[in-house]
Image (tube, rainbow, N blue to C red):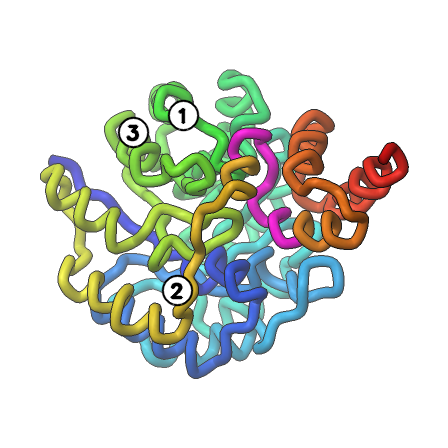
Amino acid sequence: MKKIWLTDTTLRDGSHSVSHQYSIDQAVTIAKALDDAEIDIIEISHGDGLAGSSLQYGFSKATDNDLIKEVSGVIKNSKLAVLILPGIGTSADLEIARKYGAEVARVATHVTEADVSQQHIKVAKSMGMKTVGFLMMVHMAPVENLVEQAKLMESYGADIVYCTDSSGALLPDGVKERITALKENLSVDIGFHAHDNLNLAIGNSLAAIEAGATYVDCSLNGAGAGAGNARTESLVAVLKKSGYETNADLYKTLDTAEKVFRKIVPEATRPNDLTLMLGYAGVYSSFLLHTYKAAEKFHVDPREILVELGKRKVVGGQEDSIIEVAYEMSQKK
C-alpha cells in the first residue's frame, strides 16, 4: 500500500479559529507534540500566510518570523512549512522565513491565477526549499483549467501541486475527478487540502488518496477556517485502518489532539449552520468571521450573505464585498 505524507496546518489554517492569537509558547508546545508524533510537515504562519497580519485579515499576536524561529528550534522529526500568497507575502518574506528555519514553501494562488506564483516558486527552489504549488478554490474552475494551471506550477519547479477545496464545497466524486486528472497529466506528486464545511473532509481526503494523492493536509481537532480541516487524529486513524503507510504515531497523535491542543484551545472549530452554508454556497472558508460581523452590523441573515457571495463568485482578497453585500441587503429590508 502506498505511503501518505501528512501536513498538519493547526498553526496556520488553525490560526483562523483563534483569530490568529497563538502565543509563541502555545505554538512551540503544539509543534513539539506534533513533532514527537512524527507528523511529516508542520505549517506555521498567519492564517492568510506570510505577512497576512493586517487590518484586513486580522492582526497576529506574534509575528510570523518569531513563530518560525522559535518553532524551528524545537522540532527534530518534522519539516517546517510556511504558506505564502503572492500579493500578500513577498519573496523577501519568504527569504526571511527560510533564514529562520522554514524548509517547505507552499505558494498559494486562486485556481485560475497560477502564473503569479512563478517568482515565489523559483525563489523558494533557489533556496533549496521543498516547494508546493497550492491551487485554491478548485471548485470554481473546470477540470481542464485546473490541469492547465497545475502544469504551470509544475513548469515553474513545484515539487508538489495541491488541489485545495478552500470552500469545502466538493463532494467525493468531484475530488476524485480532479485528483485523477492531475495524476494523469502531471509528473510531480499531488496533494489535497480539505475543508469540513459539508462534513466531508475525511471522506474527501480518502477519495483524494484513492485517486492518487500522496500528500494530504489536516489539523488537530479540525481547527481551521470555516468548519476547519480534516482532523489530524481522525485522518491518521483512517489511514492506518485502511492499510496506508504513514509515519505518524496514532497514540501520540491522539494525545496531541486531546491532551495538548484541547487544553490550549478548549473550544476548537465546530461545524454549524453557517459553516455548512460556506460549503453549500462555495464561499472561501476564511470569510466566516467577517460574515458574522457584517450580519450583526447590518442586521441581516448571514446565510443570505453567503449565498449572495457564492452567486457573485467572490474569492479571497475580496473581503470588502462582504460589507457591500450586507449593506445592500439591509437597504432592501
Of the image marks 1 and 2, the number of the one nearer the N terminus: 2
Report the predominant secondary structure element of the magenta stretch: helix
Tell me: 266 left or right of 75: right
Query: What amino acid is found at the position of numbered circle 2 in the picture?
Result: Leu
Can you identify the residue that label 3 sits on?
207
User: What's the amino acid at mark 3?
Assistant: Ala
Taking the magenta stretch, the answer to whether it contains residue 285 is yes
Q: Which residue sits at x=17%, y=66%?
A: 252
Q: Give the CA distance from mark 2 to mark 3.
A: 26 Å
The dot on residue 171 is 1
Quarter of the figure with the C terminus: top right
Residue 78, horizontal then vertical, whole percent: 29, 64
User: Nearer the N terminus, badge 2 or badge 3?
Assistant: 2
- Characterize the local packing of mark 2: few (<14), some (14-19) or many (20 or more) Cα atoms within 10 angstroms: many
Residue lying at 35% horizontally and 50% vertically, measured from the top left:
218
- Rendered image: mark on residue 64: none
Q: Which mark is residue 80?
A: 2
Q: Amino acid at mark 1?
A: Leu
Which region is colored magenta?
A: 279-289
Q: Is residue 164 above or below residue 125?
A: above
Residue 266 picture location, percent across and down: 39, 69
Taking 232 as reference, is 71 left or right? right
Residue 318 forms part of the magenta stretch = no
- Residue at the image position 36 percent from the left and 47 percent from the top: 217
Q: Residue furthest bottom?
A: 25
Q: Judge by depth and name the residue closer to the eye, 322 or 188.
A: 322
Q: Nearer the viewer, mark 2 or mark 3?
A: 3
The image shows residue 187, relative to residue 181, as above or below, that is below
Count every numbered label the image shows and give the total.
Answer: 3
